[in-house]
Image (cartoon, rainbow, N blue to C red):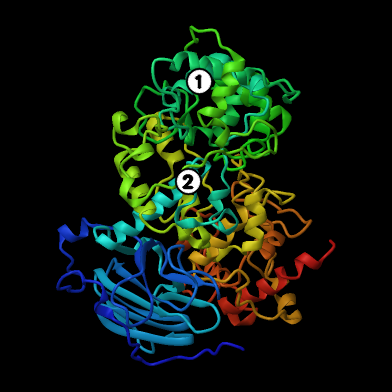
Amino acid sequence: MKRLLFFAPILFLPFAWSAVAQDGDFKPGKLPKEEQALLEPGLTLRFFADKNAKTPTDVRRVRIAALHVPEGTAPTPFVGPGPFAAKLSGYLKADLRSEFRFKLKALGKASLRINNKEVLAAEDGVAQTEEPFELSRGFNKLDIVLVSPMKGDATVRVSWTGDDFMEEPLPPTTLFSRKDHADLAEGLAKREGRFLFAMRDCAACHQLPGGVKSAELAMPEMQHRAPSLAGAGSRFGKDWLVQWIQNPRTLRPKATMPVVLHGDTVPQDAADIAAFLQTLKEPVEAAKAKATTAQGEKLYNQLGCLACHHFNDPKEEETLDRYPLHYVNAKYTPEALSEFLAKPHARYPWTRMPDFKLKADENAALVAYLNAQAKGKANPGAQAGNPERGEKLFASTGCANCHSLKTDALPKGTNLRPSPASDNLAAGCLAEDAKERGKAPDFGFAKEKRESLRAFLAKDGGSLKRETPAEFAQRQIVNLKCNACHQRDGATTRWFQVMEEEGGSLPELLPSLTWTGEKLKPDWSAKFIAGQHDHRARPWLKARMPAFPARAEMLALGLSHQHGFAPKEDSRPEPDEEQAKLGETLLPQQGGFNCTQCHGVGKMPAKEPFEAPGINLLDAAQRLRYDYYPRWMHDPPRIERTTRMPKFAQDGKTTAIRETLDGDARKQFDAIWHYIQTLPGKKD
């Protein structure tokens, strides 16, 4: 059934607005400084069993004023599928007292309230304000409610229009909410604990909580397995293995592998296990090319490796949360390092190490540079190792529960312990000191991580049977440290911070991730993240997008859901041959916008891109959602302030080309859209 578009006056949507305590006696624009200090970017999203419920079933934070839940799926991992109500609340910050028009898109029943006044209501359609609504300078209270439909997807999106900009989603840089609400803290803690449970491989030694079966698992990270140790003897240095097995955190302070050995026999036990692993031999493939350290250093900087890594001794303070490469020579043989750089996901599909699809000469150059820079030497074990005893220890200490010894094999977990019950969450791995921990593995958990795991384990574990793509994307953007290279929501990248702190030329301006979920079609994004496209959209960049195949599909889908879009949702107009012909005339310099100076068109390269190349318009046709396209064309610098793409419609309505479509910017940009949509079907 086709959804209806309508323009609605203010309607009343019943909902328990008092279900969550309000932030005092709020006066628009007059939020006290002490309350401003409690704000963080994003809105608080609360879920309720229905519109009349007073207590939320779950709470989390979102960065966009939007929500999309496909029919038959869970709105959150901690709530089962079925009807629900949701409330997004926080503040909308305006730089000046100004008037704006608002628009509300809904599948289900939705309502928008600003400063405790209902502004819009919609049901299975679109509503927009007939008259401009005035926002006070500073913080304006914002509440958005969605009651899911009985059948079909549930969706809500809020956009606005100002005097100097066309319709756009509420920018994340304008949205804030308080961080001190107890229900939010509880919701975030159990999410962190759930993530730790998956990524620390707790299920390798413990039964799944709440009687959950392995076949029921839906959380993608539960597929995580520790790195394979196949061929360990051909890859790792003996001294490094001994020290790593004794205490991984002496080599990498934030190592996720726990300390599993205890007592006076630790040095001998570690030497024995290392001796066993040294017996595991298999061929290791190294890049067959010659290169210099200078070439490697250049590539190390161009790829942004320095945004995530440093060569300092791990004992030294690191303020930028980077991983040390001090011991990389002690860990890997040169051949094994080359193999790892070539295929980082081969033995560890869930590694955060990017796959840059290195060529042989690039691989050799990086190996040469890393070998020259990594000065750390592991402490040699004083004891001679006994491989037979080490093999038995490998099984008895639980190493075999997490690590496989054959390529493509799964570890063989045995004697799984029950999942910790709510009455013993202060013992074992979660103990606060060695005495209480006993012989349990020591993960080095900080207090807040122990508390997060306890918060998760105190629940029934049923959340492992459900996944919400938007939350997966939110976790992995942080986990993969995408902000190391990409700007998002106005934040400075870590790459830029490194260059500011350590000196050197500033990094390249890479695409912002702020609007990725609205901008790119998920099926294209999934292939892009997986590294499956046959060419680069921006080949002029020295940096390059790495591949993360294990995460690609869910990450792309989740980014779309974060922006309130179904994966196939796209309001593009039907193809129009006449419009396409007009659009083609608007591309060249003569009578057009001179797009072809910077943009290639299919097999025709850009004429004179100089320092401002643009992506091929064929790529644009295959990548972009139409919903994003018109606002980009109307005002590129508003979306991405560092772009070199000019603003052709200075007044937001007309362009300097008056001979075509009477200078109407929207019609001209649509004509170009119609033309570029013909490119994928062209042979030339």
Residue drawn at point x = 53 percent, y = 48 percent: 510
Q: Is residue 277 above or below residue 553?
A: above
Residue 552 visible here: yes
State the image quarter where residue 524 is shown. bottom right
> Residue 492: horizontal and vertical position, in percent?
40, 46
> Residue 249: horizontal and vertical position, in percent?
42, 26
User: What amino acid is found at the position of numbered circle 1 in the picture?
Assistant: Tyr
User: What amino acid is found at the position of numbered circle 2 in the picture?
Assistant: Asn
Q: Is residue 639 left or right of residue 544?
A: left
Residue 293 visible here: no
Q: Which residue is mark 2?
A: 479
The label on residue 60 is: none
Residue drawn at point x = 49 percent, y = 23 percent: 245
Earlier along the polypeptide chain: callout 2 or callout 1? 1
> Residue 592: horizontal and vertical position, in percent?
66, 68
> Residue 661: horizontal and vertical position, in percent?
63, 81
Q: Residue most toward the right?
A: 683
